[in-house]
Structure formats: structure tokens, C-alpha cells
């Protein structure tokens, strides 16, 4: 009896410790966002308040401008990534391609190499082309980095579409193009949406590429977070961090709705 | 017909390939050429200079990344192992709900969390003091190499645990039951029966984590001080302060080599596994 009691106590203690290690850092973020004044040696904020939330959410403020920039860049990145990935994904799933495995690996490479070393050279090339500090420059950098998600997932989505439905449409006289747009594409849509969400988040959270290519004109939320934090303004940094967390958590809760098992099992094949 | 089919396929893939070529393959080639180009032609001069200035940071980077990878592996194995073999229902449920949280949190947000949490006056120290576990005067800031390792493990262990738990769920439970019936403890079962079967998944997860940790700029910038620091920060400094591309690219090639060594170990391991099977 005492042994099971001791065992239960140990288990509860372990779970509480783990919860503290995981939730604690996030809780500290929330504390800072509501701290108007907080300094050593006080364990909790000296003055509580929502003043900094007002500063961040003021429509004319820097934070709202960064949020608008971040969302525009993420939407444009999704557009660019899907525009090249839908044809590529279809070809990889359905057509006979030489060096198919090699082509799949090429899209993985940008994620498999230490990024900083690549981005400093992208920035140098962009400088010659007048692309540093432009939205367009940042968008294509984000898109190239996220292609592994969009190409691999759209390809899996096309591979999961039942071919007999396409043959049936062709048999009753639909052209290949008409079949693609009325049968294949709508059936692959949930997988394509899932890949779009991956690309959107990847772009929204991206720091390193924007840091080198976006300077000095493009300020996204991660860059605002960084400069606020390094400048010692932990309130602005924490609130920006919390804004960035919202889409990540929504994604964690809903991703399984879009990414079904039949598509999931074909990713990377 | 087959020929036109192939040509059509390549045409459809071409824009995506062009994007990767322009924004990854070309800069990659550029960085390697720049690293080996000195004022006197091709040579190793940039590497000599890079090592004179940053050999300490090369060792520091290897130390941080290797330690974080090992700890990530241990924590992830413990979490996934308990999720698979745990017998206390509420603990398994609680753990399954808890451990995923850092998974989708961006590195820059994780860095900001830890910058406040691990500080001298952060929630970690303050909680320990509040429970009387340490004296307020004895608190130390963990915002140095320890903070970087903690942040990396906090962020990557859930990712590896997720992969591992999936792999462990799909192995044949009969082998585990048999070993348990013969009297093997759960820990022994995990190490001798379960772990060998999910080793390939663990290796893939740890290699992806290794490369990720080698690439992240925000965590060493925000969590630790400036000296010593990781190679990513040195590269950024070399560019932003001096516009010194040759030395920055030499450091870049050093980081490619670290990735290549890990990839080589993995390939050798994968080939040997396949050879046995």
C-alpha cells in the first residue's frame, strides 16, 4: 500500500516537473506581456497592466505594420510556392519522369544544409540585382525554403487521387485539361490546402533569411521580436511572440483535418 | 508519345527546379568557390584565417550541437518509451497531451521564452527560490551555453519523441509481451527489445535535429552572450561588421562538413542495416 502511494507521488511529481519545464517558459512570456514594470529582486511584475498591448495593437504602430508585412509576405509565398508546386507535384505523382528520386531530393536540400551560409550569399547576389530589402526578394527566399513541403505534400495529394475517376471522365469525352481541373484538382484540394498551411507558417516564422535579405526595409514580426528583445523591451518582444504563437497552436489543433492518412502515407514517395 | 510525355513532365517540374537552383544551388556553389578563393588564387588561406579567429567557436559549436543531440535522444526515448509501455493510464494521457507543445513553436519564440525563463530573475530561478530549494542569493543566470542546450532540447525532443512514438506504436507487441512474461523489467525491455526496432527512426530524427541546431541563428544570438558563440553568429558578424565574405564562407564550408560527417555516419549505418536484413 505504502509502495503504491510512494509510486503515485513520484509519478505526480515527475508530471508536475515536466509540465513546469514545458509550460514555464511560455508562462514567463505571458507574465512579461502584462508587466508594466518588473525588475530585480521582485519575483513577479511590480506593476501589472495592458499598456504594452495597447502600444502593440495601436493601428498606426510599428507592430501592426510588421504584422501586415508578415501576412502579406506569407500569402505571397504561398502563391509562389503553389504556382510552381502544383504542376511539379502533378508531374511527380502522375507522369514518367527521368531522375524522379533525384528531383525529389533536390527539393529537400535547402532544409538539409546550414541556412546561414546560404543566405549570406543569396543576400550578396540579391544586392547586385537590387532585390535586398524588397518584399519580392524575401518572398522568393521563403518560397524556395518551403518548397519541400509544398512539392512533397501536393505530390502525395495527387498520388492519393483515385485514377479510375480520371479515366471515367476521359471515357465520357472530357479533355485532359478539363479532367484535371474538374476531377483531379478538387479531389487533391485538402492535401494542397494542408501544404499551403505548412508554407504559410514556415514563412510567418522565418527569421534567418529575412534577417539577411530583408534588411533594412522589410520588418516582419520575427525581426520586430528580435530587435525589441535585444533592445531590452521584453514586453513588446513577448507580445509579438504571443501573436506568432496563435497560428502555430491553431495549426497543431487542426492539421489532422486537412492531412488525411491516405495522403500522409504517400509523402516523400 | 512516351517522349512527349517525359518532356511535358520535365516542363511542369522546371519552374520549381529553377527556383531551387537560383536560390539554393547557385548560392551554395558561390559559397564554396568564395571560401577557397584568396587574393593569390585558389587556396586554403581563408580557412587558416577562420581557424585562427574562430577555432574556439568551432569546438564550442560541435560541443553544443553534439550534447544537445544526445540529450534530445535520451529525453525523446524516455517520453516515447513511456507513451508506448507506460501502465498508468492518467500519466500516459497527461504526458501525451503535454509533450507536444513546443513542437510548432518557432525557434525565435522559444528563444524569447528562454531569455526570460532562464534569466537570473526568471521564472525558473524564482520558482526554485519560492519553494525554498535554493537561496535567492545563489541564483545564477543560465543564459550561456547551458541556455542554448536547454532551448535546443526543449524544442527538438518533442519532435523526435513524436516520430519515435509513431514508430514504437507500429512494432509487434508480441515480442514485448513475451519478454515481459519472462520477467524482463520495462526499462530493460525498452532498451533491448523496443529501441533496436525503432533505431532507424531515432537516427533520422536526431540527424534532422542536428542539422536544424547547426542552422539556427536566433537561439545563440538571443539566449547566450557573444563570446564564445556558435558559428552561425560568427558568420553573421563577419558579414555585418566587416563584409568579409571569404572568411564567412570558409566557416560556412566548415558547417557543411559537420553536416556531411553526420550524413556519412548515417549512410554507413543504413547500408549496414540493409546488409544484415
Image (cartoon, grey):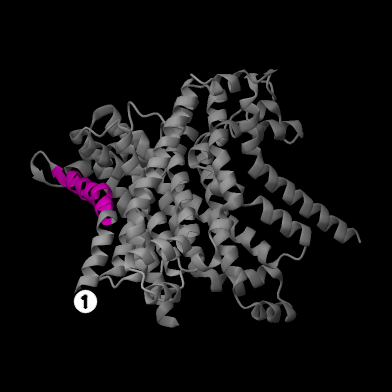
B81 vs A102, nearest the viewer: A102
Which residue is rendered at x = 44% and y = 34% of the image? A70
Q: How many marks?
A: 1
SS class of the residue under badge 1?
loop
In the picture of the structure, the residue carrying the numbered disc 1 is B1
Which residue is rendered at x = 42% and y = 69% of the image? A159
Indicate the quadrant containing the C terminus of chain A: top left, top right, bottom left or bottom right: bottom left
In percent of width and height, residue B4 lies at 20, 71
Span of residues in magenta? B17-37
Q: For mark 1, does the 10 Å Cα neighbourhood hold few (<14), some (14 to 19), or many (20 or more) residues?
A: few
Dominant secondary structure (helix, strand or loop) of the stretch shown in magenta: helix
Q: Seen in the image, is A80 located left or right of residue B121?
A: left
Say if residue A179 shows up in the picture: yes
Would you identify the image quadrant in which residue B190 lies? bottom right
Q: Seen in the image, is B47 located left or right of residue A34?
A: left
Parent chain of label 1: B
Amino acid at each position: 500500500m505504502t509502495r503504491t502511494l510512494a509510486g503515485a507521488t513520484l509519478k505526480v511529481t515527475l508530471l508536475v516537473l515536466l509540465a513546469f519545464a514545458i509550460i514555464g517558459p511560455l508562462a514567463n512570456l505571458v507574465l512579461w506581456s502584462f508587466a508594466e514594470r518588473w525588475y530585480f529582486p521582485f519575483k513577479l511584475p511590480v506593476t501589472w497592466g495592458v499598456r504594452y498591448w495597447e502600444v502593440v495593437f495601436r493601428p498606426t504602430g510599428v507592430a501592426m505594420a510588421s504584422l501586415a508585412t508578415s501576412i502579406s509576405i506569407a500569402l505571397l509565398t504561398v502563391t509562389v510556392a503553389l504556382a510552381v508546386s502544383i504542376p511539379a507535384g502533378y508531374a511527380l505523382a502522375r507522369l514518367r519522369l527521368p531522375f524522379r528520386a533525384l528531383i525529389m531530393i533536390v527539393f529537400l536540400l535547402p532544409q538539409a544544409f546550414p541556412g546561414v551560409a546560404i543566405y549570406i550569399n543569396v543576400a550578396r547576389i540579391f544586392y547586385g540585382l537590387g532585390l535586398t530589402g524588397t518584399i519580392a526578394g524575401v518572398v522568393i527566399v521563403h518560397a524556395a525554403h518551403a518548397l519541400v513541403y509544398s512539392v512533397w505534400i501536393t505530390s502525395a495529394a495527387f498520388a492519393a487521387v483515385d485514377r479510375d475517376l480520371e479515366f471515367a471522365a476521359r471515357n465520357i469525352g472530357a479533355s485532359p485539361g478539363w479532367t484535371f481541373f474538374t476531377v483531379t484538382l478538387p479531389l487533391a484540394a485538402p492535401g494542397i490546402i494542408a501544404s499551403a498551411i505548412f508554407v504559410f507558417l514556415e514563412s510567418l516564422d522565418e527569421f534567418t533569411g529575412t534577417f539577411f535579405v530583408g534588411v533594412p526595409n522589410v520588418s516582419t514580426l520575427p525581426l520586430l521580436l528580435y530587435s525589441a528583445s535585444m533592445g531590452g523591451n521584453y514586453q513588446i518582444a513577448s507580445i509579438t511572440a504571443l501573436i506568432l504563437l496563435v497560428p502555430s497552436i491553431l495549426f497543431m489543433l487542426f492539421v489532422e483535418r486537412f492531412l488525411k492518412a491516405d495522403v500522409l502515407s504517400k509523402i516523400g514517395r | 508519345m512516351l517522349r512527349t510525355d517525359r518532356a511535358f513532365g520535365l516542363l511542369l517540374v522546371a519552374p520549381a527546379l529553377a527556383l531551387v537552383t537560383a536560390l539554393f544551388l547557385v548560392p551554395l556553389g558561390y559559397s564554396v568557390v568564395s571560401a577557397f578563393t584568396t587574393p593569390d588564387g585558389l587556396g586554403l588561406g581563408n580557412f587558416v584565417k577562420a581557424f585562427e579567429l574562430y577555432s574556439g567557436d568551432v569546438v564550442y559549436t560541435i560541443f553544443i550541437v553534439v550534447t544537445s543531440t544526445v540529450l534530445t535522444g535520451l529525453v525523446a526515448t524516455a517520453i516515447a518509451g513511456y507513451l508506448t509501455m507506460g501502465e498508468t493510464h492518467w500519466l500516459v494521457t497527461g504526458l501525451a497531451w503535454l509533450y507536444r507543445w513546443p513542437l510548432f513553436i518557432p525557434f525565435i519564440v522559444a528563444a524569447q521564452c528562454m531569455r526570460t525563463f532562464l534569466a537570473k530573475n526568471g521564472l525558473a530561478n524564482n520558482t526554485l527560490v519560492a519553494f525554498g530549494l535554493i537561496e535567492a542569493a545563489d541564483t545564477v543566470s543560465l543564459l550561456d551555453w547551458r541556455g542554448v542546450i536547454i532551448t535546443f532540447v526543449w524544442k527538438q525532443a518533442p519532435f523526435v519523441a513524436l516520430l519515435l512514438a509513431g514508430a514504437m506504436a507500429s512494432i509487434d507487441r508480441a515480442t514485448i509481451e513475451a519478454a515481459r512474461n519472462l520477467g524482463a523489467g520495462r526499462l530493460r525491455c525498452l532498451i533491448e527489445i523496443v529501441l533496436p526496432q525503432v533505431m532507424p527512426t531515432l537516427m533520422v530524427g536526431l540527424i534532422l535535429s542536428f542539422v536544424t541546431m547547426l542552422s539556427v541563428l536566433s537561439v545563440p544570438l538571443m539566449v547566450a552572450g557573444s563570446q564564445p558563440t556558435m558559428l552561425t553568429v560568427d558568420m553573421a558578424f563577419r558579414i555585418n561588421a566587416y563584409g568579409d565574405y571569404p572568411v564567412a564562407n570558409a566557416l560556412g564550408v566548415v558547417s557543411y562538413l559537420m553536416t556531411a560527417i553526420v550524413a556519412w555516419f548515417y549512410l554507413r549505418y543504413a547500408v549496414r542495416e540493409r546488409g544484415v536484413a
